[in-house]
Image (cartoon, rainbow, N blue to C red):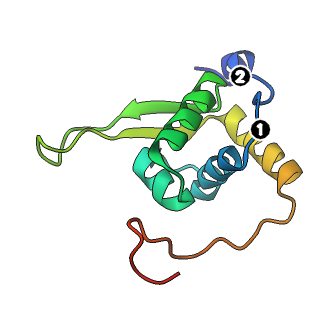
Amino acid sequence: MTEKAERAEARSEPLRITRSFLDVVEAFLDAGAEELHGYAIIKTTGLGGPTVYKILERMAGMGWITARWGEQTEGPSKPRRRYYKLTSIGMQQARELIAERRSEKPARQAFRPAFGGGHL
């Protein structure tokens, strides 16, 4: 999809901006051009799975992210991962949103245990 087509499909702003939405957007900005899978976003943000996946669905509908299925390589008992990446328009709008809503970014913890173990 061309950038012009992305721009035409993307909404200019999310309908509702929550702390959780901003946390997921920041996770994408922190990842730069890298793809993220849902579980990585859950670990990074500390949010629950249903919350993260609902936000990812909203972002995809806005044209901010693209998604693709990964290959099944880890055995039959593990589901395939879905990978997400910011579009160029999504990147631009995400930066603007974070600059507007979180001008002073709090220091993010370097270590966030996935299952509550370890130190904070």
In the image, 24 versus 16, the foreground residue is 16
- Can you give x and y, in whole percent of width and height, for residue 41 in the image? 50, 52
- Position above or below: 48 against 55: below
Residue 69 in view here: yes
Question: Regarding mark 1 in the picture, which secondary structure is present there?
Answer: helix
Q: Residue at x 65, y 53 (%)?
A: 23
Which residue has dot 1 on it?
A: 93
| Whether residue 37 is visible | no
Seen from the viewer's position, the closer of residues 93 and 103 is 103
Side of 50 relative to 14 (left or right): left
- Label 2 belongs to which residue? 10
Q: Residues within 10 Å of mark 1 (few under 14, many from 20)?
A: many
- Residue 97, quarter of the rendered image: top right
> Where the N terminus falls, by quadrant?
top right
Looking at the rendered structure, the secondary structure element under dot 2 is loop
Mark 1 vs mark 2, CA separation in Å: 10 Å
Q: Amino acid at mark 2?
A: Ala
Going from N to C along the chain, the mark reached first, 1 or 2, is: 2
* Quadrant position of residue 83: top left
| Residue 84 place in picture, x, y as percent | 49, 39
Residue 30: name its quadrant.
Answer: bottom right
Figure disc tally: 2
CB-based contact (under 8 Å), mark 1 and mark 2: yes
Q: Amino acid at mark 1?
A: Gln
